[in-house]
Structure formats: C-alpha cells, structure tokens
Image (cartoon, rainbow, N blue to C red):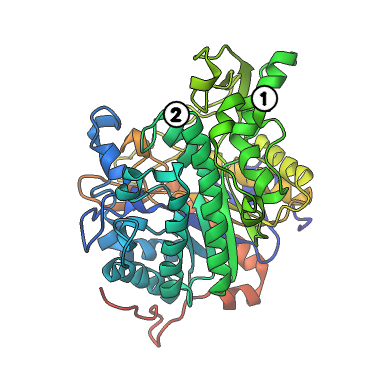
Amino acid sequence: MSTDRPDRTAPPHTPEGLPRFPPGFFFGAATASYQIEGAHDTDGRGPSIWDTYCRTPGKVADGATGDVACDHYHRYREDVGLLKQLGADSYRFSVAWPRVRPGGTGPVNPAGLDFYDRLVDELLAAGIEPAATLYHWDLPQELEDTGGWRVRSTAERFAEYTAMVVERLGDRVGRWMTLNEPFCAAFVGYAVGRHAPGAQEGAGAIAAAHHLLLAHGLATRVLREAGAREVGIALNPDHLVPASPSAEDTAAVRRAGVLHNDIWLDPLFAGRYPEHERETWGPLLDAVPRLDGDLELIGQPLDFVGVNFYRPITVSDTPHREPDPARRTAVDIGAAESWQGDVRTTTMGWPVVPGTFTDLLTELVARYPALPPVVITENGSAEADTVSADGRIHDTDRVEYLHGHLTALAEAVERGVDVRGYYVWSLLDNFEWAFGYDRRFGIVRVDYDTLTRTPKDSYHWYRELIARHRAADGPARTARTAPATDEHGNGTPSKES
C-alpha cells in the first residue's frame, strides 16, 4: 500500500480526497441481467421466476416488471461506451439463464448466447475486461415448477447451463462468478417471500441454500475443466452487531450469523457446516438433503471471493413469530434486525457507516485463514438524486457514500486484507426488484420514459478516481488496459447485431 494516504478530511469532490490502492488494483461497474436487459420475450428467451413474480398482484411496487428495464439488450453498445468513457477496467454482468436455456432443460438457445457474444466482443474492443456472473436470481420458471432450488436436480441443470455458456464465451471471458448473493436467492426468495419465487418456507429455504452451494460446486468444476482463469462466487456477508451486551442479544447475533454468513462461508472456506445451525433452525434441519461428498464439492479452492457490501445490521433478541419450531420459516430465528445510531440512511433505509466495511473485511480474513483474495463485487447506494435546470444530476450523497466506503476499503487493504478490485453498484439506474423503479443505485441516470442515459456527478467522480489511480500505476497498466484503436483513435469495431 502506498504511503501516500488520502487526506480523509478533504472534500470528497477533489482529487486529494480520493483513496489510493495498490498497483494492479482494478475498478469496474456491475449490473444484473433481469434488472437492465429487458427484451423479456425476444430471440427465444423463456420466462423466469421474476417474470412470474412481477405479474403477481401486490408483489412489486406499482406493478413494475423487467420487461423493458433499461433495454440494455438493444442498447448495450451505448452502455459499453459509458464504461469506456468511465475508464472502467472491468465490467461485471450476469448471464440470463432463461435466455440461454429457456426452460432450464433441453437444447441451448443460440440466439440468446449470441447476445452475450456481441456484448463480450464489444467490451474487449473497448479495452474492458468482461466478468460474467452465471446466476443473478433469474431461474427459469419451468425449473421452479418442478421444485426450484428446493431440489438437487436444479443444481445439476445449472452445471449443464454453465457448460453451455463457458463453451461459447470461455475463450474471451477470464473472470467468472457462479452465483450472486445466494442468501437472497434462498432466504429472501424462499423464506421471506419478498423476492421471487415468493415462498415462505422453513426446510425448503434451507434446502435451497444447500442446493445453491451445490450448484456453485458443480459449476466450479465445469469452469475448471474448461480452463477458466479465475473462478469465484459473489456473497453478501453482513457485519452484525448486538443491540446490547446482554446474553440474549449476543445469542441472537450468533443465530443471525448462521443465517447471513456461516451457512455460506463455513462450507466454502472451512470445510464444515455451521457450528450453531441446530441452535438456529432446530428440527427444520432434519429435512435438508445433505449427502456424503457435498462438502468436498462445495469447498473446492477458488481464485477469489466476491463481497457485496452496503450496510451493517444491528441484531436484538425477539420472540419467535411461530411457536412451533417445525413450522417456522427459515428466517424466524428469534432475531430482529435494524440499525441503532444517529446516522444518515439511504433511500433503501440502510445506514451509512463506512467503517463497518473495514470491520467486516478484517473479520473475514481473521476467521477464515483459507479465504482467497477478495474482489468487491458490489458497493453503492440508492439516493434521491436531484436533476438541475441544466440537466445535471448532483448526487452528492452518493459521492459521499462512495468516498467513505472506498476510504474504508483502502483502510482494510492497509490492515492486510488482499483486495484485488472493486465494482461499483450500479452502472445504471435499473429495476430494483420488489421496489420496481422507485430506487436508483446508478452512477448513470436512466429516464425510464425515454431510456436516455445521463452520467451523474458520481460517474464523473468515479472516473476521476480511476484516472488518478491509473496514472499512479504507471505505463505498464496503461498499456495493459488501453483499448485497441484504429489510425483515427477509434475503438476497434465489434461484431454487428
């Protein structure tokens, strides 16, 4: 880490206020297929659980859907242009399973893979490294109809789908993530019911968690056999703090830790199931179909672990909602989640406490000696952006959020955490799941009526950070990341649609 540390009292809009990172550190932006692509019934794409969920009355704000979203499917060249202007080293996107294998089984859909072919080529022509996430929650509806993530066969179908994608893209995509936030897929989708498929279950949700991990293991094996350069998974571990030092609140944090963190991290990086899972879930565990050899499959070595971080959580002891332990949902663990303290919150209601980002990362490294290098795969904030009379978007709160969290990330690096890169969430305002289009995370504003893209102040701030870091990284980095150009200085043409 450079000894030229940022002045952490400097105004966040100035270069002096930007944190510095080690040579070779990369910066990028992230998105997800259902949130931006649109084209929900184009070129053979099949329905996903999110298409179904959005059409269920009362599930999504204002009855919104991802049918059009940001229309990235047709406007990807414009969006890659924004990434190039940003100076992004890498772009993290997700592949839509229903676009590649519409029913989750059966033959590949060539037209679906053609889109990702074009996107990857466009990125490479712009000098941007493509980084693919294979699952960001858009399970084919036909697989949900036969059990979804509750059943083992879905993990096997995921491995087959992975083989289809890597066969087409593996010659150009080097960085792969198997899953994004399996916590949300399993527990928000199958226990809370606030995400697709909208179930509220106990054993079914815990089984979904296990089968998601199996899917990761199977996909990792497929990617390794295909020669993938970097394989990882994007998790959202939480920094949990007790509401008080009482024994009751401390025990509630322990249970919440199993739900949010241990069920993923322990099998992946410690070769075990969580120590306190029986305390957390009781008889619900008896119905989870774990087999001999599952831990070995799940715990294969990874090249990196993706960390998505947004906010800390305060946990307190609370009565169970369901008295019968066998009938509880997987999130009914006697722990209430909130935040205590007088701090600013984003429009998601999430507290802005950047120092807890440092705490989380250092805790992960201390707890898991086998933890691979870290990549921050998501970090950002939803804010009430204001559009000025001249059309500019002055998202000062987002700039301050990013400044604080990148400074906290730099502090974690100084404390010895091996962090290799950072993806801001998100490149574009987009469909924010059950909130519809009511929450904006983008560093680029999307007018949902016209689909016009407008870079915000945070975009320009982030571009300045990247440029400053790249200049400090020396000529070798500039040569490695510069886009190919023709004699006129234009990017190398990509394949046409």
Q: Is 477 located above or below residue 56 in the figure? A: below
**Residue at point 30%, 46% (across, down):** 391
**Residue at point 28%, 48% (across, down):** 69
Q: Is residue 60 left or right of residue 317?
A: left
**Residue at point 43%, 63% (across, down):** 160
Q: Is 329 located above or below residue 411 in the figure? A: above
What's the CA distance linking mark 1 and mark 2?
18 Å
Task: Tell me if residue 352 can be seen.
Answer: no
**Residue 106 image position (x, y, % from top left):** 31, 63
Q: Quadrant of residue 422?
A: bottom right
Identify the amino acid type marked 1.
Answer: Glu
**Residue 233 image position (x, y, % from top left):** 57, 54
Q: What is the secondary structure assignment of the residue under circle 1?
A: helix
Name the image quarter holding the N terminus.
bottom right
Nearer to me, 80 or 302: 302
Q: Which residue is mark 2?
A: 201
Q: Residues within 10 Å of mark 2 (few under 14, many from 20)?
A: many
Q: What is the secondary structure assignment of the residue under circle 2?
A: loop
**Residue 347 image position (x, y, % from top left):** 43, 30
- Number of labelled discs? 2
Q: Quadrant of residue 71?
A: bottom left
Q: Are marks 1 and 2 in contact (CB under 8 Å)?
A: no
**Residue 140 image position (x, y, % from top left):** 33, 51
Nearer-N-terminus badge (1/2)? 2
Q: Is 362 located above or below residue 319 in the figure? A: below
Q: Residues within 10 Å of mark 1 (few under 14, many from 20)?
A: few
Q: Which mark is residue 279?
A: 1
Q: Residue furthest bottom?
A: 487
Nearer to me, 286 or 209: 286
Q: Is residue 496 left or right of residue 295?
A: left
Identify the amino acid type marked 2.
Answer: Glu
